[in-house]
Image (cartoon, rainbow, N blue to C red):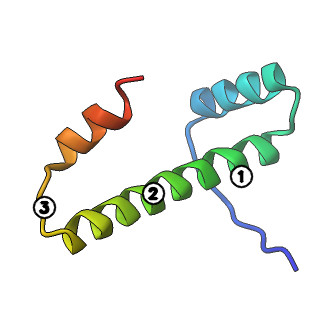
C-alpha cells in the first residue's frame, strides 16, 4: 500500500528539484522519495552511533561525529 503526501514549496525550489530529477533520469516523485529516505537513513545511522557510544560510556559531540563521518 502507498500513501500520497503533498509538499508545498516555492516555484523556484520546485524547478530546482525538477532539474535535478531530470539530470538523474528519474521523476520528481522518485527524486523526493530518494532524498527523504536518504535523510531518514542518515538520522537512523546517527542515532545508532550515539547508542553504541553511550553503551561504552564514551561521550562525543555531534560535531566530532560529523567531522569523522564526513572526513572521507
Name the image quarter holding residue 22.
top right
Question: Of residues 6 and 56, which is closer to you in this image?
Answer: 56
Judged from this view, the residue extending furthest toward the front is 56
- Left/right placement of residue 42 relative to residue 52 reads right
Disc 2 and disc 3: Cα gap in Å? 17 Å
Q: From mark 1 to mark 3, how far is it between C-alphas?
A: 35 Å
Q: Earlier in the sequence, mark 1 or mark 3?
A: 1
- How far apart in space, not on screen, are marks 2 and 1 (Cα)? 18 Å
First-in-chain label (2 vs 3): 2
Residue 15 on image: x %, y %:
68, 26
Residue occupying the far bottom of the picture: 1
Residue pointed to by mark 2: 45
What is the secondary structure assignment of the residue under circle 3? loop
Give the mark nearest the N terminus, 2 or 1: 1
* Local secondary structure at mark 2: helix
Q: Nearer the viewer, residue 67 or 4?
A: 67
Q: Nearer the viewer, residue 31 or 10?
A: 31
Q: Quadrant of residue 52?
A: bottom left
The numbered disc on residue 33 is 1
Identify the residue at image location x=67%, y=31%: 17
At x 37%, y 56%, the residue is 46
Could you say which is closer to the camera, residue 55 or residue 27? 55
Check disc 1 and report its element: helix, strand or loop. helix
Amino acid at each position: 500500500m502507498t500513501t500520497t503526501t503533498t509538499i508545498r514549496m516555492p516555484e523556484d525550489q520546485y524547478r530546482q528539484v525538477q532539474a535535478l530529477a531530470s539530470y538523474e533520469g528519474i521523476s520528481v516523485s522518485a527524486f523526493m522519495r530518494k532524498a527523504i529516505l536518504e535523510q531518514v537513513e542518515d538520522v537512523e545511522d546517527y542515532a545508532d552511533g550515539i547508542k553504541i557510544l553511550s553503551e561504552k560510556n564514551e561521550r562525543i559531540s555531534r560535531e566530532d561525529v560529523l567531522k569523522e563521518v564526513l572526513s572521507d
